[in-house]
Image: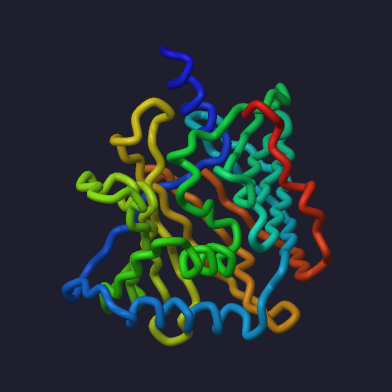
Amino acid sequence: MSPSRLALVGFLLLFTHFGGAQQTGTTSPATASTQGAAVLQKALAALSPTPITDVTLSGTARRIAGSDDESGTVVVKALAGTGTRLDLTLPSGARSEIRNISAVPVVGSWSGPDGIAHPISYHNLLTDPGWAPAFTIASLVSAQNAVITYVGAETRDGQSVIHVTASQHSPVANDTTGLLQHLAQTDVYLHSGTFLPTSITFNIHPDNNANVDIPVEIDFSSYQAVSGAQVPLHVQRFLNKSLVLDLQFSSAILNSGISADTFTVAAGL
């Protein structure tokens, strides 16, 4: 197995980006207009009437990777316009993922029990990891060259949802491949009554092949009001439809003044 493929396997088993839930019913034809952006703005307003600068979530985590099934603790931190961080403490050891979106270009790293930091490929940094949906949707709305499409009403996992896709146009003139738009695409599913996100889906890719899609899904539930915002205290991640990470948060702290240094990625990665 090549080093790049080993890096991918380590990354997938480490955190766990994840696969899809079954959809039923019909979907109206996709229409690219201001409607999609307006729906995402409604979602942002439902999540937090006032802007959130940072969030710290802590609780318990279950990680499933093949025959490994272990439980421990988790801390998630996110700072608007700067980055996200996940830290797991498990019987097998500590595992972390850091993304710094304030860097140009964006950078990220992951590490396992040995503490060695590995880079996250650039094409896997074009979608938000989904640790906190308010930050995910805010990043989609504010993305440069954003393409937001209203797909329509659907039934997903027995719930009535509104489906919106978001991506980016390539800034390169005459780019006919559409690769950037594909790599950056995120599908958002909002509860049709509350506009709170129920799921987001996107693809990750092997380190050495951005053309191979690996489906990821993140499900949000158990929303609770925290400092005027709605925070999902239960987050599940699936990879290729298999559960790989189950997070149950017992504490949510907003606007605590997280330092940007929290999201520093080692030089050279």
Q: x, y percentage for residue 126?
A: 46, 48
User: In the image, is residue 123 above or below residue 248?
Assistant: above
User: In the image, is residue 138 above or below residue 268?
Assistant: below
Return the residue nearer the eye: 185 or 247.
185
Return the residue nearer the eye: 242 or 84.
84
What residue is rendered at 63% in x and 85% in y?
Answer: 49
Residue farthest toward the top in the current orientation of the protein: 1
Q: x, y percentage for residue 88?
A: 70, 42
Return the residue nearer the eye: 197 or 262.
262
What residue is rendered at 46% in x and 51% in y?
Answer: 127
Snapshot quadrant of residue 150: bottom left
Q: Report the quarter where the C terminus lies.
A: top right
Q: Report the quarter where the N terminus lies.
A: top left
Snapshot quadrant of residue 240: top left
What residue is rendered at 34% in x and 29% in y?
Answer: 209
Decide if residue 159 is on the left or right side of residue 233.
left
What residue is rendered at 29% in x and 45% in y?
Answer: 179
Q: x, y percentage for residue 208?
A: 39, 25
Decide if residue 154 is on the left or right side of residue 189.
left
User: In the image, is residue 76 above or below residue 205?
Assistant: below
The answer to whether residue 211 is visible is yes
The answer to whether residue 157 is visible is no
Q: x, y percentage for residue 105?
A: 55, 43
